[in-house]
Every structure is written in structure tokens, then in C-alpha cells.
Amino acid sequence: MGTDSLRLLALLLGAVAFTGCATVQPQRAFDDLGATLNGRTEARVVWRTGATEDSAADHAIDSLLAMPLIPEAAVQVALLNNRRLQATYEDLGVAQADLVQAGLLSNPVFGGGALWPLEERGAPDLRFTVAFEFLDVFYLPLRRRIARSAYEATRLRVAETVLGFAAQTRTAFVGAQADAARLALQHVVVANAEATYNAALLLREAGNIPAVDLLAEQARFEQARLDLVRAEAQAVESREALARRMGVFGDDAAFALAGTLPPVPVDERPEADLEARAVEASLALAAARQDILTLGARLGLERPESLLPELEIGGELEREGGEWEAGPEIEVVLPLFDQGQARLARLRAELRRKQAVYYALGVEVRSAARLLAARLAAAHTTARQYQTVVLPLRAELTAQTLRQYNAMQTGVFGLLMAQQEEVQASRRYLAALAAYWTARTDLALLLQGGMPDLDAGMLSTLSGGGAPARDAGH
């Protein structure tokens, strides 16, 4: 074997040894995720890998669940404990493994053989070969660039998932609080309806009201009892949705919620340059941009791979007739038929599709900024109107009716009806309050870089139809 051939073989063997030292380090990928989330959320994320750090996470979860939960605590428990979210982190490990794989050369191919003489005894003729994909050395940097771009897109999407999961947990908390308050109000409605029905019974026995009035009050009472069953079921649904997001079960699912929904602030100032800020922060847009860069790099690799021949270079060592012979060996696959036309066309089509998706995402993010700002303003106005005008007005009306009742200027039905109307106003106020805090959570998520569910409208919520329905799954 010539000196040049030996040098080339040594160079290739050195490259193999160098790339063979590359290792996968999942924790480094998770550190990259933490850097992406830094400044976007105050909650702490932990990758539960079965290490000793998991016990610290378990201790933190126990401490948070031991106290009445506030929204921030519920979000923290969910980020530490939900196994579906933990499974998402494995996407980072997969992407990092692909990145390491892209930096590895193809394995060398070793061969050997032996031939024995058939007519006379003697030493066999021996043959040994080794071959490498020679052009892999030159493609390696571009392949690593492609894998690095794909890894960055995965990191951005996992970060977006974490932010979305945190926001959805906060929304589930708002729903659980609102439904618990609605259940308490429904108990009041049932008590009022029962009192009205009992008063109607006494008046009917005294002959002061016709039978139709008694039947009407009985129907209202029975309907209120049915509404109570529905309110209890809805409270259980909302609570279990929150429990699933936090990943708790057994005794841990008996957590207590701290307080009720806070009132809306006096002033809700619109965010300045909302659309521009949303576009700049959007992780979905950043990931789509990385997809375009990845496909561009793949096109840059596919062109030379399609046009250049496959070149394997190696050496051969052979003993024949008792003498050793050595020399280089080259194998070439010429692209005579398959020149990569179909693969290039496919990549170009994918690139055009990714560009269209990127443009569409930009439109959707801007639309989301306008829509969520409008939702927040409407919910704030509605909740403030109930908070400052409607509820005080209903309370004063009930108080005035009570004075008239004490002065025997109105009957018991008038008083009970005023109380029922006050409870109904409180129920609608709770719905508007839940809509406000949900809209505020969605807008905060958008400015953090996530993308809220815009299909969960809030018109029914503002009219008292309940908290916005959200997917309880991950």
C-alpha cells in the first residue's frame, strides 16, 4: 500500500475515532429549554428522569398541595407532576440524538476471505478489505446544520407546549373556582325556592291564592333542585379537569381551592403595540421559521448528493502464493438514472408549504392579538358593570323590598322574588368574572409566545352560560 493511501486511511480512522466520542446529553437539551422559557414564565420546570432530583420535586408538590391552592401553585404542581407534559420533554432527547447522529460518519465496511487450493495442499490465499463512504466527510457539516436547525424547532415547540399547558391549567383553575361559587349560589336559589313554595302552601291552605299559583311555585322549586344537581356535576367536572392537569389522584385530589375569583381591576389599559409584540414573542412563528431554514439546508445538501457519485474509498490487503500484496480500492456509484429529481421536487413542495404556513401563522397571531384585546375589554366592561352597578342595585332593591315587607306593603312572594333576582345577578357576575380572567390568561399566553384556543368564544359566558369550555386533555 502506498504512502498516500496509508495517510488517507489513517485520516479516515481518526475521523471515525473523533466522531465516535460524541455522546447524547439530554440534560443539556433541557437546559436549553429552560433558557427559552426564562423570562416567559415564572414557574419552574423539571424533567423527571428517575434521578435523585425527583424527590425534591415530589416534596415541592406535597408542600403546595398541603395549602389551599392559588393559581400559581396549581400551575407549578402541573408543570412538576403532569406525566403527559413530562413525555413531551422526550422530544428534546430525540432531537438531540438526531443532532449527535448527524455528526457521525458512516461506519467503515470491513471484509475478508480465504481460498484454499483444491488439488494440492497449501496455505490459503487471504484477502482483507476496508472501505469508507469518502464524501461523508464533506457532507458532515451540512448535515449537522440541518439537524441543529431541526433541534431548534423542536426546542421552540416544546417551550410553546409548556407555556400553553401552564395557561390551560390556570384557565382550569378559574373554571373550578367559578363553578364552586356557582354551586354555592345555587344552594341559595334552592333555599329561596323552597321558602317560596312553603309560603305558597300556607297561603293556599288559608285560601288566599289559587291552585295554579301553588303549582307554579312548586315547579320553580323542583327546577331549582334539578339545577342544583347540574351545578354539583359541573363543579365536579371542573375540579377533575384541574386535577388531571395537575396529575394528582387519591388523597392529593382532595386539594382545597383558596378563596374565590378576585374582582376585576378598576382600569384595564390596552397593551401598546400588541400585534407587534405578539409576533415578536411567538414561538410558533419562530419554529415555523426554523422549519423553513431546515428545509433550505436539506435542499442545499440534496443537490450535491443527487448529482455527485457515491464514492467509497478504502484499501485491500491480499496474500496470494505466499506473498502479500496491498493497494487502494475505490467504488463509484454513478447517478445515471436516479439524479434526485423526485426528491428535489418533493423538498421544494415542502418548502413552499412551510412558507405558506409561516405566512398563515403570522396572520393568525395578529388576529389573535386583536381578538383577545377585544375579548378582554368586553369582559372587563361587563364584569365592572355588574361589580359596580348591577350588584349594588340588586342589593338595594332587595333591602327596599324587605322594608316594604316589614311595613306590610308587599307580600312574601315579592321579597323572595327580589332575593332570587339578586342571586341570578350574582351568577351572571361570576360568569363575566370567569370570562375576564380567562381572556386575561389567554392574552398573557399570547404575549409569552404561546397561541391560545381562539375557538372557545365567551359570548355564552358573558350571558351566564358558564366558563369557557376548554380541552381537559394535553
Image (cartoon, helix red, strand yellow):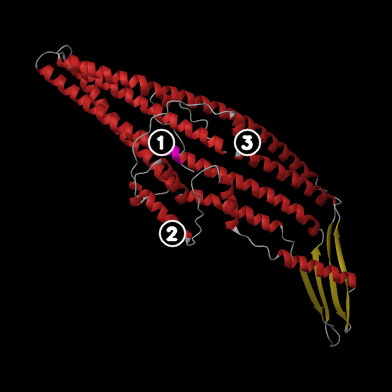
Residue 441: x and y in percent read 48, 35
Residue at 34 percent of width and 51 percent of height = 250
Give left or right: position of 139 versus 471: right
Q: Which residue corresponds to mark 3?
A: 280
Magenta residues span 169-174
The reply to whether the magenta stretch includes residue 57 is: no
Q: Which residue lies most toward the top here?
A: 409
| Helix, strand or loop at mark 3 | helix
Q: Quadrant of residue 127?
A: bottom right
Quadrant placement of the N terminus? bottom right
Q: CA distance from mark 3 to mark 2?
A: 38 Å
Asked whether 339 or 258 is in front, the reply is: 258
Residue at the (72%, 43%) spot, across then down: 293
Query: Is residue 172 found inside the magenta-colored segment of the image?
Result: yes
Label 1 – label 3 distance at C-alpha: 28 Å
464 in relation to 32, above or below: above
Q: Residues within 10 Å of mark 2 (few under 14, many from 20)?
A: few
For badge 3, the amino acid type reads: Glu
CB-based contact (under 8 Å), mark 1 and mark 3: no
In this figure, which residue is indicated by the disc labeled 1?
Answer: 174
Amino acid type, callout 1: Val
